Structures are given as structure tokens and as C-alpha cells.
Amino acid sequence: MNKTKVIEKVVQKTEVSKSEVEKVVSSFLETIKSALKDKQIVRLVGFGTFSSNERKARIGRNPQTGEEVKIPSCHHPKFKPGKEFKEYLN
């Protein structure tokens, strides 16, 4: 399911206009991305926790040539589902 389909489902369930739902969903996603960029944790009780982890710099190998390559440190997003969400899926 993509963002457009999520918006359509929310419109059907809430009977709110598509443009309003689109603004809310986009704003929600931007808020989460902004918080993660600022190294904050976003907890949605019953759904899950979004966080950002740092991968340390390391040495890797080019699989084609076997040459060592320096991989810089970076941040990557992480999601841990909440208890209620896990139970819902089972």
C-alpha cells in the first residue's frame, strides 16, 4: 500500500475531504522525519516507536574487485512495533 492508497482509506473511514487528509498525512510524515533528523524518538503508544540509529564508519569490500572501501558513518531510521500492534498482526 502506498501513500495515495492510505489517503483514500482514511477518506473513506472519516468522510473528511481528500485534500484535508492529504495535508494531515503529509504533515504527520514530515513531523516524524524532522524529529528523527533531530535525533528524537517518536513513540506512538499501541503502534510503535520510531528512532534513528548511527552506523559507525567501517571498512568494507567491493565485491567485484575485493578492494577495501571506507564506508562513512550515517544515521538510519528504525521502527519497533508496539505490543498492541504485534498482537493485532497475530
Image: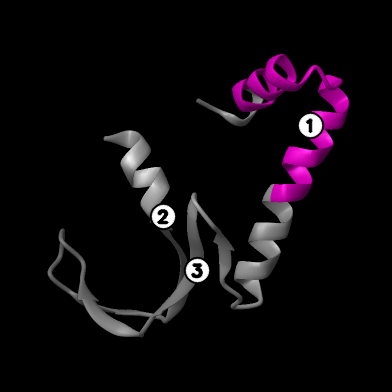
Q: CA distance from mark 2 to mark 1?
A: 25 Å
List the residue tagged with mark 1: 22
Instruction: Report whether 79 appears left or right of 59.
Output: right
Per the picture, the main secondary structure of the magenta-coloured stretch is helix
- Of callouts 1 and 3, which one flags the residue occurring earlier in the amino acid sequence? 1
Q: Which mark is residue 51?
A: 3
Q: Is residue 50 above or below residue 23?
A: below
Q: Is residue 25 magenta?
A: yes
Neighbours of disc 2 within 10 Å: few (<14), some (14-19), many (20+): some
Q: Which mark is residue 82?
A: 2
* SS under mark 1: helix
Q: How many marks?
A: 3
- Of callouts 3 and 2, which one flags the residue occurring earlier in the amino acid sequence? 3
Neighbours of disc 1 within 10 Å: few (<14), some (14-19), many (20+): some
Q: Which mark is residue 67?
A: none
Q: Position of residue 78 (x, y in %)?
A: 43, 62
Q: Is residue 22 above or below residue 72?
A: above
Q: Residue at x 28, y 84 (%)?
A: 58
Q: Is residue 69 above or below residue 62?
A: below
Q: In which quadrant of the rendered view does residue 65 lie? A: bottom left
Q: Residue at x 49, y 71 (%)?
A: 52
Q: CA distance from mark 3 to mark 2?
A: 13 Å
* SS under mark 3: strand
Report the span colored magenta: 5-28
Q: Amino acid at mark 1?
A: Glu
* SS under mark 2: loop
Q: Nearer the viewer, mark 3 or mark 2?
A: 2
Instruction: Name the colouring of the figure.
Output: one colour
